[in-house]
Image: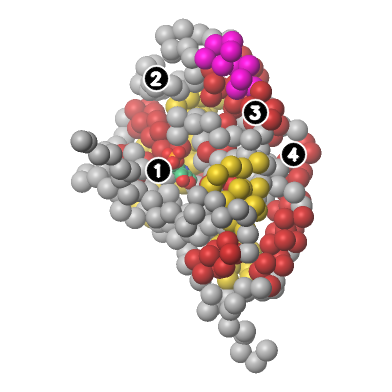
Amino acid sequence: MPTLQEYPAYARLQGSLLGASESLLSWSDGRELLDLYGGHCVNALGAGDLGLGRALERQWQQLSFATNLVDHPGRAPFYEAWQKLMPEGDWQVFASNSGAEANENLLKMALAATGRSRVVCFEGGFHGRTAAAAAVSDGANGFPLTPFDVLRLPWGTTAGIDSSVGAVILEPIQSLGGVVEPPAGFLEELRALCDATGAWLIFDEVQTGPGRLGTPWASQHYGVIPDAFSSAKGCAGGFPLGLSFAQSERAASVPAGLCGSTFGGAPLALAAATHVAQRVAQPEFLDHVSKLGRAFHGLVGTGPVVGVRGVGLLIGLELAPGLSAKEARDALLEQGILTATCWNPQVLRISPPLTLAGSAVGQLAQALCHLPYPSPAGS
Ligand SMILES: Cc1ncc(COP(=O)(O)O)c(C=O)c1O
């Protein structure tokens, strides 16, 4: 008798998730957990958003799938909705299925357009697990060779970006790396260097957009517009979709037909993404994200929290020495709140649904006050 088991890719939490609604998770031990993780930024509208469900149902009944050999009527509303979120400029988009693919395709486009074979990336960056995305991610790549030359620079530095470089890729805020913002002037310097050398400046906005920073994209928050950027995770509110955006002027030098995907841009994913963009484009939606982000920043000094980093609802709580983020995450889970760790052992990550209720901040504050941690000397 053959057997089949899951490949052990993940170290999972104890228990399992039986259901979810908005920012509440029904856990297998009977508790309702407050979701401050948001399915890793995927549940942008919260779990089970009714409008999103209706959009998917309507689309499924009208046209469940269309191959890319044909056009379908879901494209026009998608462009109309997403256009409203775009940074200044004329843009083209290619749709795939995940964040890694979205980055992979942008790197392919940039190298094809420039005719170069070197990519600059940064220590602490994460861009996915396919060959090109893994090559520019920090840590073990998982492949014996990289598909192009990689120059990995310390975060915030630019030495070596010259006319041999086809693309510079970065997360505007490094999320897994510890919710690390760009140092002042860094993005502007990268923009100037890419203008001078002809390299594509690529922002990986898989976590920072759409809407998570209180602006549609990080580029609008920081005032620096890249040549290209990727989106995935929350962009279709839980439906798999990767989007690779490139300035039309840059995209004009990419050979037609370089990219392709069976499922990319199919009706269901576009219907979901159209609904997400329509919600994010409402001014009160982004105001809510900014306001809630500021409230989380007010947690400095609460329990073990010695600092708060990040923008909008991409947040890192810096913990006092003596309590690691993993210990804090486990203790908060005991108290009914799901948070996340990252590569910095002292930073607890918070990336909730963008629709989270304001009362969640008080709930977290109370729970933080109950965390066991050594009191600062002398207090
Ligand atoms: C910043 C960033 N880029 C890319 C990816 C890869 O996305 P996916 O897992 O959808 O391939 C991730 C996933 O965590 C991410 O956080």
Query: What's under tag 3, amino acid-wise?
Result: Leu
Amino acid type at circle 2 is Thr
Tell me the kind of residue under disc 1.
Gly
Q: Which residue is mark 3?
A: 52
Is the magenta region chiefly helix, strand or loop? helix
Ligand 1 resides in the quarter of the picture at: top left
Looking at the image, tell me whether mark 2 or mark 1 is earlier in sequence order. Answer: 1
Q: Earlier in the sequence, mark 4 or mark 1?
A: 1
The span picked out in magenta is: 55-64
Alpha-carbon span between mark 3 and mark 1: 26 Å
Tell me what residue is drawn at x 57 percent, y 68 percent.
Answer: 331
Indicate which label's residue lies in the foreground, 3 or 1.
3
Is the shortest distance between ligand 1 and the CB of mark 1 under 8 Å?
yes
Residue 191 shows up from this direction: yes
Q: Nearer the viewer, residue 6 or 357?
A: 6
Whole-percent x, y for residue 12 in the image: 43, 54
Instruction: Give me the disc on residue 262.
Output: 2
> Which amino acid does the dot numbered 4 rest on?
Phe
Between marks 4 and 3, how big is the CA–CA gap? 15 Å
Q: CA distance from mark 4 to mark 1?
A: 28 Å
On screen, residue 282 above or below 341: above
- Residue 171 in the figure: left or right of residue 118: right
Question: Could you classify mark 3 by the number of other residues whose Cα lies within 10 Å: few (under 14), some (14-19), or many (20 or more)?
Answer: many
Q: Residue 161: x, y in percent? A: 39, 47
Please name the residue that numbered disc 1 is placed on. Answer: 128
Crowd class of label 1 (few under 14; some 14 to 19; many from 20; radius 10 Å) = many
Q: Can you tell which mark lies on residue 199?
A: none
Q: Is residue 157 left or right of residue 185?
A: left
Q: Determine which of the numbered discs, if any, sits on residue 285 in the image.
A: 4
Disc 3: residue Cβ within 8 A of ligand 1's nearest atom: no
Tell me if the residue at label 4 has its CB under 8 Å from ligand 1.
no
The quarter in which the C terminus is drawn is bottom right
